[in-house]
């Protein structure tokens, strides 16, 4: 068994907890740092006795004595509305990011971190990693600053970093995220509860929906590669909110219809779709789970959880 140790910030979160479980299953030691903002102990309940759990912001990494073989930095406020409600989160993301990068510099280990496809807002589809980044909101400014800091630590200190620009990630264990959860989950919850979901505009807006376990694959491939830089993590397929809603409705046999309201968000992103060529070519990453299969999985999961 490999004796490697990995640190996962945000390891009690939606994606982070799935990554932690995969690392443990592979025989690695895992240290989790999480302030439980949208994470939950329940996401790790079946592996709590197998991880070292530190409650707090990601900057607590600077207090660790362990010398990790790699860091997965996912403990980053993950939704644009959070930043609109509290723009000060931008400074927290930067402070935490510097602490994580300093740790990796001192220990000499690689870093794989979560970035976002929201950075592409204002560009034509499909989104490529070499596209310009425009000033659109607080959330993307925080993530772009983190990307630039990672590049700086690579250039100045030789820290190998990979930033994964995640597209619309959905899957099990999103209940603790509440209103910040993916629309696939939110639509599912509404229909299971007999509630009417709200859709902005006419529902023709699209997202490149990617299943959470495929995203975990991308993180693991990135850590195990020798590559560095920025990579898209998506499917290359865009699906409208209306189509997603219909898929969930058909599986559940529901007759509920959504309520359409005018979009109140000035910088709302109407379409996303990843160009996946770079990740496929350099990382060997390609999403495996179809949207229909992923939706079937989470519908069954939330049927049980909300029963």
Image (spheres, helix red, strand yellow):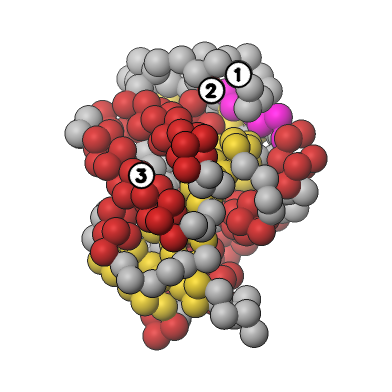
Callout 1 crowding tier (Cα within 10 Å): few <14, some 14–19, many ≥20:
few
* Numbered circle sitting on residue 97: 3
Q: Are marks 3 and 2 in contact (CB under 8 Å)?
A: no
CA gap, disc 3 and disc 1? 23 Å
Secondary element type, mark 3:
helix
Q: Which residues are magenta?
A: 270-276
Secondary element type, mark 2:
helix
* Residue 81 relative to residue 289: left or right: left
CA gap, disc 3 and disc 2? 21 Å
Residue 273 lies in the magenta-colored region: yes
Q: Given this view, does label 3 or label 2 mark the residue nearer the observer?
A: 3
N-terminal of the pair, mark 1 or mark 2, is 2
Residue 99 lies in the magenta-colored region: no
CA gap, disc 1 and disc 2? 7 Å
Q: Are marks 3 and 1 in contact (CB under 8 Å)?
A: no
* Numbered circle sitting on residue 93: none
Vertical position of residue 258 compared to residue 141: above or below: below
Q: Are marks 1 and 2 in contact (CB under 8 Å)?
A: yes
* Quarter of image, res 224: bottom right
* Quarter of image, res 245: top right
* Numbered circle sitting on residue 120: 2
N-terminal of the pair, mark 3 or mark 2, is 3
* Residue 79 relative to residue 20: left or right: left
Q: Where residue 49 appears, x then y in whole percent?
A: 39, 85
Secondary element type, mark 1:
loop
* Residue in view at x 27 percent, y 42 percent: 95
Q: Where residue 267 appears, x then y in whole percent?
A: 39, 17
Vertical position of residue 237 compared to residue 105: above or below: above
* Numbered circle sitting on residue 131: 1
């Amino acid at each position: 068994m490999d004796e490697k140790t990995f640190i996962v910030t945000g390891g009690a979160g939606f994606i982070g907890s799935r990554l932690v479980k995969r690392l443990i299953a592979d025989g690695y030691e895992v240290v989790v740092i999480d302030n439980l903002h949208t994470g939950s102990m329940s996401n790790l309940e079946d592996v709590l006795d197998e991880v070292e759990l530190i409650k707090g912001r990601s900057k607590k990494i600077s207090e660790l004595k362990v010398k990790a073989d790699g860091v997965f930095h996912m403990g980053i406020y993950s939704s644009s509305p959070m930043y609109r409600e509290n723009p000060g989160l931008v400074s927290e993301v930067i402070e935490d990011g510097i602490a994580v990068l300093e740790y990796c510099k001192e220990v000499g280990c690689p870093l794989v971190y979560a970035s976002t496809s929201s950075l592409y807002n204002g560009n034509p589809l499909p989104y490529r990693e070499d596209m310009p980044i425009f000033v659109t909101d607080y959330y993307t400014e925080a993530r772009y600053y983190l990307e630039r800091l990672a590049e700086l630590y690579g250039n100045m200190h030789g820290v190998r970093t990979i930033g994964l620009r995640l597209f619309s990630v959905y899957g099990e264990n999103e209940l603790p995220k509440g209103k910040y959860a993916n629309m696939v989950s939110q639509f599912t919850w509404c229909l299971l509860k007999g509630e009417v979901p709200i859709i902005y505009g006419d529902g023709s807006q699209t997202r490149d929906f990617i299943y959470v376990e495929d995203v975990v694959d991308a993180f693991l491939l990135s850590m195990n590669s020798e590559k560095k830089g920025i990579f898209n993590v998506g499917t290359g397929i865009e699906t409208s909110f209306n189509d997603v809603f219909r898929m969930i409705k058909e599986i559940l046999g529901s007759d509920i219809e959504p309520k359409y309201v005018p979009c109140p968000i000035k910088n709302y992103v109407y379409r996303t779709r990843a160009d996946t060529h770079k990740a496929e070519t350099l990382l060997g990453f390609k999403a495996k789970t179809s949207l229909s299969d992923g939706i079937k999985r989470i519908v069954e999961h939330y049927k049980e959880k909300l029963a």
